[in-house]
Image: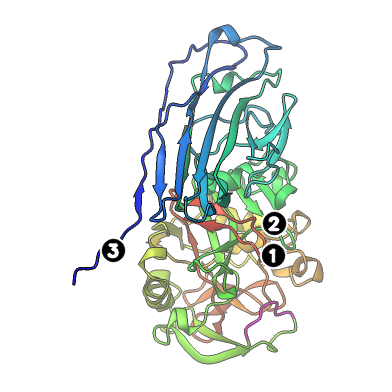
Amino acid sequence: MEVKNEKKVLVLSFLGVITFIAVVVGATYAYFTAQGGGTGNINVNANTATTDNLSFQTGSAISLTANQEDFYQGAENKSGETFARATLTANNATNNATRNYYVYLNIESNDFEYTTVDKQAEILLKVTDPDGAEVTTLGSLERKTSGGVTGFDITTSTGLITIADNYEITSTSTVTQDWNIEVIFANLDSDQNANTGKSFSASLIIQKEPMTTSLGNFAEYIANLYTTDGENGLYLHDGNGTYGAQEAGDNSYRYAGANPNNYVCFGSDEETCPSDNLYRIIGVFGDEVKLIKHEYANSDLLGTDGDYSSSTYSNTSSSYYKGTKTTINRYYWNVNGTSTWSESQLNTVNLNTNYLNNIGSTWSSKIANHTWQVGGTTFANVYESPVKTAHTYEVGASTANTTYQAKIGLMYVSDYGYAASPANWSTNMGFLNSATNRDNNWMFMGLSEWTISRWSGNTGSAFGVYSTGLVNYSSVDDYNFAVRPSFYLESSVVLTGGTGTASDPYRIS
């Protein structure tokens, strides 16, 4: 007997229109003409076996480009609009249908930048839902007011932005839901000439299935959170800011203080990030984000070979311990006794073999192969000096320039020093065992742990952060400390969600 099975037929098609227009250069104020709207995309139908019919339609792409005739102070804001439409027709048998769908704004190209010191929003996104209400929360996008308009700041955003997530549509006959999108270039009445020659192009996607979404390049996203020193827990180390003489002077963006929102879920896609997969952002260095594991790594990640020690810490080993583990494994820096990082099995075996293998290729591929400065520095430049001196001789202008290329390393001494509130940056690194530093340094976890930096005046010693908070040297084969892997993410890594808190860490694609 032949059995015929009716199957769902899903036909998805999208037509994207991307328009790039040449820009006239040399004007004083930069504004835009906009193209958008219309019904440039063909319908998309998703039919069910019971003759329910869910169809989709989108308007034309939005393109913003410069136009010389709009280059004058006091010009109106320029905008482009488009829409995404879902239409559901119920079947004739039950006259009742419920379906779900997803809407995304895909920013294909955007090379605009902020032109004001305080980073006022220059491109704003306004979203109106099918009920005609303006959407006021959209993932991690920040809502700002510029040029008399309030919307989501997408001045430097690229990639996918989720507009509607598994949105429900119900019909007893035929129902249509429209999402209206407006992208606005704000007239700031200031010199926006730096954006002359820049272009923005985006289109809407509406479909039955979810997509992997992106809020743009991760490093750019974090750097763009910076407005003034201390806001969002970020500090710009350009040597000219509030703390000029104490800054690293490397143009990095670093998190500092007691508990900034710099958590990242790494190594897991679970809806609730496991505590052992929480990492924290040390800072943004060029186009790379540097992370450090929040909790100490145990043998399940680092293994029981290499520089593994059978000794352990317990959660009562230090009254300052801030983690949740009951047992913490300990490792030598190099059980063979030399403080040469290339000869350390903690480096070659535990970190750059076992750890990479245990997190898997999907996650290890997101980690950049980095050139680490491993020449170290003197005792005087660390224990008897503030963090700026340690940084200068450890990785800065006066470094010994001994390098090692690998994916995984440990924190630098200066990473730890700059994680403290700026009030502590002038304190000698060996005198950081005060409550003021411990309570205002997010990187301090309360147990003795290794850094990657060696004591250059001794062939068998490296610096560590002690359980009281100070930095001092220890023999690499006599002492066994806790370990937290640190690494730089590939510059191509993008942000897909999260707010940076421990309960809602940043998620990366």
User: Circle 2 — which element?
Assistant: loop
Taking the view exactly as shown, the residue that stands out farthest to the bottom is: 310
Q: Residue at x 54, y 46 (%)?
A: 215
Badge 2 vs badge 3, beta-carbon distance below 8 Å: no
User: Circle 1 — which element?
Assistant: loop
Badge 1 vs badge 2, beta-carbon distance below 8 Å: yes
Label for residue 442?
A: 1
Q: Residues within 10 Å of mark 1 (few under 14, many from 20)?
A: many
Question: Whole-percent x and y of residue 121?
Answer: 66, 32
> Quadrant of the rendered structure where residue 81 is?
top right
- Residue type pointed to by label 2: Ala
Closer to the chain start, of discs 1 and 2, is 2
User: Circle 3 — which element?
Assistant: loop
Q: Which residues are magenta?
A: 320-325
Q: Is residue 322 part of the magenta span, yes or no?
A: yes
Label for residue 256?
A: 2
